[in-house]
Amino acid sequence: MNYPTPITSDNQHKSLTAAAQNRRVLADMERGQTYCAEGTYGTAMAFYSWLKKQVNQQYPIIDYHSSRVNRDKLRELGQRFLVRVVNHEIGLQKSPPVPWLLEFYPSLQNFYLPFTDVLGINGAYQWYVNGMQFPGLQHKVHPFYGAYFPTRTEHLQLFDSWLQHSKPVANAIDLGTGCGVLTFYMLKHGVGNVIATDINPNAIQSVGEELARLNMQGKAMLINTDLLEGVNCNNIDLLVFNPPWIPDNATGNLDLAMYYQTDLFERFFGSAYEALPPKCKVVILFSTFAQAAGLRVEHPVRYELEHYKRFGLVNHIQSLVNQKPSHKKSWLSEIRSNEIIELWELERVSR
């Protein structure tokens, strides 16, 4: 499983208290010094909020590129702001309980984590306990830590509608399942057998727990693998893929679900053509976010169809992004006003 890496050495960390001079602390952090919060949880939150404001002032966000610069800088500094974990509890007064600290680090009694990781674990635990309701599903989905879950739903609604109007499917693959939401849409529409795969073991854990919670353990086979490696595709009627939509560098498993490397689609289409039987349907849920953001990149599905004869186009369904009316304009709302959500239905051709 993938969890934040604990820091066990405490020789070089300076203490950050409510009396600390924030700008001096920031200057030290810029030089690589790590600090550990002392006192109350509120002290740590106050400093982190101040730190984000400083990064926003120094690296203002005006477009997609600047948003990545801002994010990378905040991540860099955030890794140098630590909290101590003692007996599986945050070592600060008035800290919230985080039960996953015991589950993730059962043999460690005293260590450090970046405060941003603690916030991430605590936030993910709340999503896990409370669950998420997606349109068209009768039950909530409870994503485990580190499993990707969609925060937008236009593509899910496209897929739900496509399943409703498509021919019955006996055997399907949910490639890169994440929290398993596409698997649950397929089970809802009566797909007989689903294979859910993901390179991230946390995703497999997440879907396994969800199936057990719903008493549906026998409805899907879970495989921890990269793309279709080791997957028996002989009888597959449908492969569903909701890939990352944005070309960029990934720094962790969740990033791999949001940002794709340059060779991802080449590897995907090549492996799908080799593994899938003729006439097998391939549904790809995608977005023109990269083009709307002005990134100079080929649309990977269009590129495949225009340069290879491995898959034929059956249907291409498009939907605009739903945005709440607002008088405030931002770089992101400008992108989404030009973004199109897509469902590509392809068919593997015969050799």
Image (tube, rainbow, N blue to C red):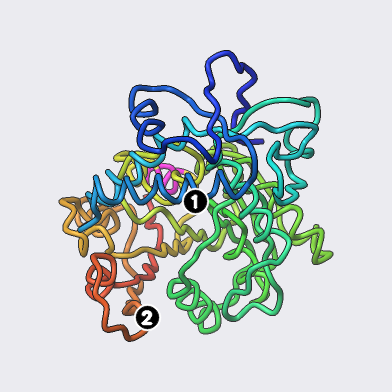
Number of the label disc, if any, that sits on residue 276? 1
Q: Is residue 100 above or below residue 344?
A: above
Q: Report the span colored magenta.
A: 268-274
**Number of disc labels:** 2
* Residue type of the residue flagged with mark 1: Leu
- At 56% from the left and 45% from the top, the residue drawn is 43
Q: Secondary structure at mark 2?
A: loop
The tag earlier along the polypeptide, 1 or 2, is: 1
Q: Quadrant of residue 263?
A: top left
Check disc 2: other Cα within 10 Å, few if <14, some if 14-19, many if 20+.
Answer: few
Circle 2 is placed at which residue position? Answer: 322
**Side of 35 where 259 appears, left or right:** left
Q: Is residue 247 visible?
A: no
Q: Quadrant of the N terminus?
A: top right
Q: Nearer the viewer, residue 262 or 236?
A: 262
| Magenta-drawn stretch, dominant element (helix, strand or loop) | helix
Q: For marks 1 and 2, give the CA distance.
A: 34 Å
| Amino acid type for the residue under numbered disc 2 | Asn
Please tell me in which quadrant of the rendered image residue 289 appears: bottom left
Image location (x, y in percent) of residue 24: 37, 31
Judge whether residue 156 is colored magenta. Answer: no
Question: Quick one: SS at disc 1?
Answer: loop
